[in-house]
Amino acid sequence: MGFSLWFVLIPLLLAVSVAIAKQDGACDPERLTPQFLRDDTNHCVFYQCEYQGTSYLRAVKLECPLFNRVPSRYGKTPRYPDDSYPCSIYSRKNTLCELENQEWTTWSPWGSCSERCGAGYQYRTRRCLGGVDCPGDLMEKRECVGELCPDIDTPADSKI
């Protein structure tokens, strides 16, 4: 039993560590002023800390507008403090900050069961950002059971 649990947990832990590795630093839970974080792998992306001073603190990934990028020393020097807008470098060379290829959105919620009565299927989808070559499936399907079917042979007023 322990082996199967680790089999499930290890890929999950690896996915979380990869997602965190891109973000340079963490949102300060004690801070009440604006805070932005640089992305380690993409100079066109930054993170904005939201809901500071609350238990809902989170970092939201955002993109710089056209012709702008985040300085490599952002948040590390007085010239680029982490409470200033990150996309402060104008760059004619970097005309487009495109989304990273092979990056999926999160899965949509599961749809309703395909059958109102009995066994059916539910579906959910996701989108590939920045390209069409994301590994994996665009759609997931799982079995579901609709509401219980009325028994045709049993009269409605009978008691079991």
Image (tube, helix red, strand yellow):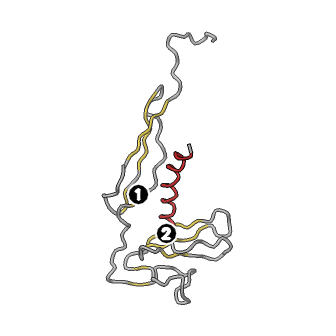
Where is residue 68 drawn, in percent x and y? 40, 80
**Residue at image coords 55%, 74%:** 25
For label 1, the SS is strand
Label 2 or label 1, whichever lies nearer to me, is 2
In the picture, which quadrant includes the C terminus? top right
Where is residue 141 drawn, in percent x and y? 41, 40
Where is residue 90 drawn, in percent x and y? 40, 84
Q: Nearer the viewer, residue 17 or 41?
A: 17
The residue pinned by badge 2 equals: 21
Label 2 packing within 10 angstroms: few (<14), some (14-19), many (20+): few
The vertical placement of 158 against 51, above or below, is above
Amino acid, disc 2: Ala
In the picture, which quadrant includes the N terminus? top right
Q: Earlier in the sequence, mark 2 or mark 1?
A: 2
The vertical placement of 44 against 19, above or below, is below
**Residue at image coords 36%, 61%:** 102
Amino acid, disc 1: Trp
**Residue at image coords 45%, 34%:** 143
The residue pinned by badge 1 equals: 104
Outermost residue, bottom side: 79
For label 2, the SS is helix
Q: Is residue 118 left or right of residue 66?
A: right
